Amino acid sequence: MSLTLHPDLLWQIFLMAADMEEDDDSNSAFYNVFQASHVCQSWRDLIVGSSSLWARIIDLTVLSKAHDDLRKEILRRTGNTLLSIKGRINDSWVESDVNSPIQFLLSLLRDEWARTRDLDVIIHGTALNILTGQFSRLLCRPAPALRTFRFQPPYNGRYHIQNASLHDLFLNHAPLLVDFKFPSLPYPLRATWLCHLLSLDLIASPGVLDILEVTPFLETLCLDERRQLVFSANDTSQFGPLEKRIPLDRLRRIHLEEVSESSLRILDQITPAPDCVLVLSSVNFEFLPPPNPRGMIIKSIITRFSGGPQTHISFLSFDYGQSSFSLSTRSEGANHPFTVLGRSTKNVLSENTFTFLLNTISLFQLNKVTKLHISVNSVTLYMLKLSLINPIYRTFFSSFRSVGTLRANPDLLKFLLLLFRPDQPVFPSLRTIEVVDSNEWQDKDVILNFLKRRKEFDSQIHTLDLTQCTNPMFAEEDFLERAKQLDVEVCKPLQVVQFTKNIRRGQLLHKDQ
């Protein structure tokens, strides 16, 4: 008996393989589909005869290097289907060459513009010069099918596009456009298609506020400041009065690629959704410690976005990894937390950045926090142990005088033991410990030592919550019994996963209901 997939299921798999949204250097939707078309005759018949599949994988990175005959064959297979075009264009060919990547892109825009649904292009090097010529003129035509328009030059290419004549972008007709990214728009920009946008990516400038006033459905906003850092200092004199605030009730994600005074000013003048998440990306967070101005800007952004230092916070979550961090706060009576995510795009985060963030968090009224989630990677904690002389760490953790529930990784509990001093108690109201999962077997002793130390100095822990742990060591009877002997109620793991030498896949051992 032969085993075959149902054609509808197979078709759905091919559609997933043809999604260029998740493309990267190691995973190309074009190659996925192209290779699948050579597996067997039935797959080939299904794929080659599907115009919608080929229309989804117009990969500029691949096709700009291909022979002209292959380009024509791929476009022929798309029929009249709406096109998704994505990829990189570089300056390795001269613009006048009819087979150059630049000319291929221009030919697509010239001949297939009316049926282009998605256009996501990254331009490298001197190829940016095309913006002052045919490219600009081709974009100033109606775009009846355009849904996504993302144009991404390298951050050091801002000079080339400042004078692009794009006041008539899409000739004011792009009724389906919802996702828009362009590094340097002419301001003021007035276009009917702005009101439909769900995602917007621009350079932070006063003109952005005018655009935001006519984008009531906006869900994602990205302000890219990498070019500002390269070319000029921010000038905020052209911003309007701070009393002016723009309501953006559907805005749930704000992404700052680097930061500046302009991005801070824009945040001051918009009111996003209550559950909006702020993402900060930077090449290097090592420049944060004062008196560096970028550090002061980020500190202002975090405190203002989180409701201000006078807000009474009842919940705080802080996770510090090797290349990213997250901070969430929820004030008393609020239904949603404020969340700030930080991501280093190049350098590993260090203990200096950690200290900077602790200083920033310390601006809040931490004595009102009743529930604290905190996790710090082991590398950072190791470096902190070498500098325990810094009083900020003990002062920071001693500020949480009302915390009754602490969720932490065992490495952090071990670090807290080093900070312990009877005359300056840490977490004096703590009654419940929720343990973050761990793969280190010695962490059992860390947890037991923490419980023992608390009991010895009249700071008894009442509950040890292990429900989120999956390591088998946390389900061992000896460990559980030793914890109970310290007068602690233990909530056992809901499930644990065992890994063996011969089986790479985890095996579920048990699950307690």
Image (cartoon, rainbow, N blue to C red):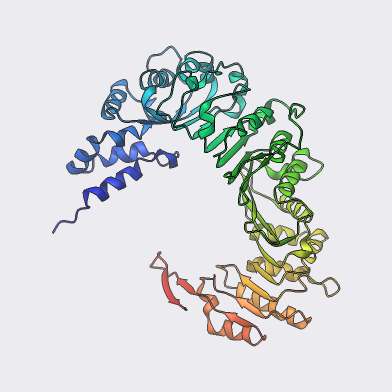
Question: Residue 116, how many percent across, how many down?
Answer: 39, 27
**Rendered view: 131 above or below 366:** above
Q: In the displayed structure, does residue 489 sit left or right of residue 387?
A: left
Question: Residue 509, how many percent across, how many down?
Answer: 43, 76
Question: Residue 206, how many percent across, how many down?
Answer: 69, 29
Specify the quadrant of the image occupied by residue 26: top left
Given the current orientation, which residue lies at the most extreme bottom position?
485
Given the current orientation, which residue lies at the most extreme right position?
423
Q: In the displayed structure, does residue 158 sit left or right of residue 88?
A: right
Given the current orientation, which residue lies at the most extreme left position?
1
Question: Residue 14, how many percent across, how many down?
Answer: 30, 44
**Rendered view: 511 above or below 322:** below
Q: In the displayed structure, does residue 267 sit left or right of residue 367?
A: left
Specify the quadrant of the image occupied by residue 253: top right
**Quarter of the figure with the N terminus:** bottom left
**Residue drawn 26% across the image and 26% down it:** 76
